[in-house]
Image: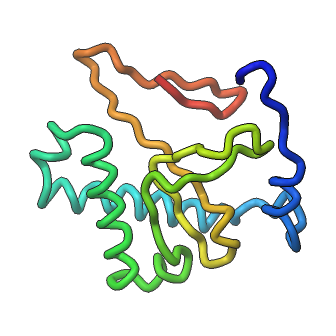
Amino acid sequence: MSPGITPRPEQIAELTRGHTIPFDPLPELNLTIIAEVLAGAWNDLLQTQRQTLLSGGEAEINALIESRLNALRDEDTGWSVLVWGVTRGTETMSYDARSLEKRPDLSLHLTSRNPSFALIVECKILDEPSGKKLKCTVTTGWCGL
């Protein structure tokens, strides 16, 4: 965070108008279904877009996943009940409005939530030969490279 950047209470007030924050957590079953659909979408793409998935860049792969997840809304009733749409790189603000232009890789717009409060998915290419490995901190629930 840069020094001199302060929270923007007016931005947060407008964003949360009419909502009680924090939201209730998503049910574990919903999170399980979302994780399973993400894994299934990846497996589907491996069948039809394997070369792109194995050699493409993050933006190219994310575009494929966004398209596949949105197509699943017409193919999977359970998915369409949970998610009304998936967008890629949609600008959003940080929780304290210090940054007004965060661009998460994927935003899952849930049917049970206001579209301004998407479930964020960050995507990273893990590549053992180049040294990009997954490291997780169990105490915070954070995983990164």
Using residue 92 as the reference point, say whether residue 34 is left or right of it.
Answer: left
**Is 31 situated above or below 124?**
below
Which coloring applies here?
rainbow
Q: In the picture shown, does residue 141 fall above or below 66?
A: above
Q: How many marks?
A: 0
Residue shown at 69% from the left, 72% from the top? 113
Residue shown at 52%/47% (left/top)?
104
Q: Is residue 43 left or right of residue 79?
A: left
Image coordinates of residue 33 in percent, x first then y, are: 51, 66
Q: Is residue 72 left or right of residue 114?
A: left
Percent across and percent down for residue 30 are: 60, 67
Using the image, determine if residue 84 lies above or below residue 31.
below
Residue 107 higher or lower than 71, as above or below? above
Left or right? Give the position of 58 relative to 119.
Answer: left
**Residue nearer the viewer, 92 or 3:** 3
Q: Position of residue 72 (x, y in %)?
A: 35, 75
Q: Residue, x 46% and y 76% (percent of image)? A: 79
Closer-to-camera residue (62/17)? 17
- Residue 108: x, y in percent? 53, 63
Q: In the rendered image, which quarter is residue 127 located in? A: top left
**Quadrant into which the N terminus falls:** top right
Identify the residue shown where x is 77% and y is 19%. 3
Residue 48 sits in quarter? bottom left
Asked whether 54 or 35 is in front, the reply is 54
- Which residue reaches farthest front? 4
- Quadrant in which residue 36 is drawn: bottom left
